[in-house]
Image: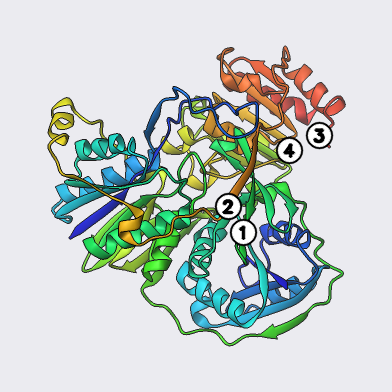
Amino acid sequence: MSILVIAEHDNASLKAATLNTVTASCRLGEDVHVLVAGNGQDAAAGAAASIPGVAKVLRVDAPHLRQPTAENLAAAALAVIAAGNYSHVLAPATSFGKNVAPRIAARLDVAQISDITAVESADTFVRPIYAGNAFATVRSSDPVKVITVRTTAFEPAAATGGNAAIENVPPPAEVSTSKVIGQELTKSERPELTSARIIVSGGRGMASGDNFKMLEALADKLNAAIGASRAAVDAGYVPNDYQVGQTGKIVAPDLYVAVGISGAIQHLAGMKDSKVIVAINKDPEAPIFQIADYGLVGDLFEIIPALTAELSS
Amino acid sequence: MKALVAVKRVIDFNVKVRVKPDTSGIDMANVKMSMNPFDEIAVEEAVRLKEKGVATEIVAVSCGAAASQETLRTALALGADRAILVQTDQELQPLAVAKLLRAVIAKEAPQLVILGKQAIDDDANQTGQMLAALLDWPQATFASKLDIANGKASVKREVDGGLETVEVDLPAVVTTDLRLNEPRYATLPNIMKAKKKPLETVTPEALGVDVAPRLATLKVTEPPKRKGGGRVADVKELVAKLRNEAKVLS
């Protein structure tokens, strides 16, 4: 029986999350296949075929799969699954994977195991519940396990060294009850938040979107990504894709610098796996200090410029 | 247009959950329960649609033990017209809930179904998508803006890269994200009126749905404890420690 990974990509390349998902898949068995559904996706398919451990790449090419809706991507995946013999179907626990995986599970009449952080065996997995304040070890009795993978819990697979066959699969008919009619995507030269080694994150204490420029200067020095708490996003300081937390992005960088963030349970859920946590806040009672390795109580508007300067010396 | 909203009774988001020492689960004794925050947003959105004259009737549905009636009364107090409790003491997982909702929807025939994107207890983020697939309806998940016109829903979605707008034909399933709206508080007069609104109870058996769980929970454990509370006196000490002790600066 084989394992199917649903690749997240933009036709030109694979998203990093796909590599972490392949690692999780390789823990489940030897015959790992990667589905690259898209349009003109030779480069992405080639990248998938270069991952060591991948046995086969299934390429489903159609104009309606260029930026597929969940309905169309699920239809492509189900066509591949029907033609194969899959015991597991995995997708990254990104907004992409979370959108499509449950559709596949429901059509297969099986449960989904969301956001796994560990593989104990072919049918037993560990996953966070209650905003990561508890972990559940669950066993699935279904013939096919549909799984989304918490990418921070698995190392990314190597990108080169593999030489898998690429097989073309005819695309199913387009489902047109759903269409993407617009996008507002953040363009940034910075590292991607979910895979950055260092993150500088701002909260309500930043007081304005303009003040985030101060964090940008610091992030430049550290080659860091910029994140934010829910409060900062709700207040309009930064766009939603900066949000770190239980229902935002889950991150686990080497260094997380929380600036003007109080440390609500829901924010901690998104960053408490960081190797080192620094907290800067004028409130000594802020809950964030309880999990910070290095806490500095003081005025962030003085501390951040001083920190940026100190890093330049 | 009839709108159907599904709501779940969960441990209140402010509660610091405790894992039972025998690893059998979460300590639920005397713990405050509330409507799942994302479901409050779903109810609020439906009520706003009714206030705009887009929705004509709002049906609130919950699946679970008898105590879920409280959650449904809250939905009624916030503005739902009728409530349905699918009552069972069986542990319900998302696939089972999706099947129960499908059965209710077969009778109610709403044009719009709104769910919270995830429940803050299991953090599964599956039910809305599963329901849409079982119904063969389109879905619009993680909604931060919802507009209905000409038999279609135009939904701005929060995705990892920013925002994406999808247009789906009705009937459709929408799941709510945090910024879709800010829910109102139930006023006392509305709480009193809600007691008189219809609340019907059905069972999974009567709906013909097998709700047996597919995932067995073997154990529930605490996360590794993180030692925190470290302090530095100033920026110089912070940078020195990050360089020499933590070694996270290159």
Closer to the camera, A178 or A56? A56
Q: Earlier in the sequence, mark 1 or mark 4?
A: 1
Secondary structure under tag 1 reads: loop
Quadrant containing the N terminus of chain A is: bottom right
Determine which residue is flagged by label 2: B215
Callout 3: residue from which chain?
Answer: B
- Does the CB distance between marks 3 and 4 fall below 8 Å? yes
Q: Which residue is drawn at 48% across and 36% down?
A: A230
Residue, disc 3: B249
Marks 3/1 same chain:
no
Distance between mark 4 and mark 2 Cα atoms:
43 Å
Which residue is label 1 attached to? A141
What is the CA distance from the residue labelled 3 to the residue labelled 1?
A: 46 Å
Q: Is mark 3 on a helix, strand or loop?
A: loop
Q: Measured from the top left, where is residue B103 in percent x and y?
A: 32, 62
- CB within 8 Å, label 2 to label 1: yes
Of badges 3 and 1, the one in the foreground is: 1
Which residue corresponds to the image point at 13% horizontal and 28% vertical from the top-left?
Answer: B189
Chain ID at mark 2: B
Are both tags, 4 and 2, on one chain? Answer: no
Mark sitting earlier along the chain (2/3)? 2
Judging by the rendered image, the residue that carries numbered circle 4 is A222
Whether residues under marks 3 and 1 lie with C-beta atoms below 8 angstroms apart, the answer is: no
Residue type highlighted by circle 3: Leu
What numbered label is drawn on residue A156?
A: none
Q: Which of marks 1 and 4 is in front?
A: 1
Q: Give the Cα separation between the discs numbered 1 and 4.
A: 47 Å
The answer for how far apart the CA atoms under marks 2 and 3 are is 43 Å
Relative side of B226 to B56, left or right:
right
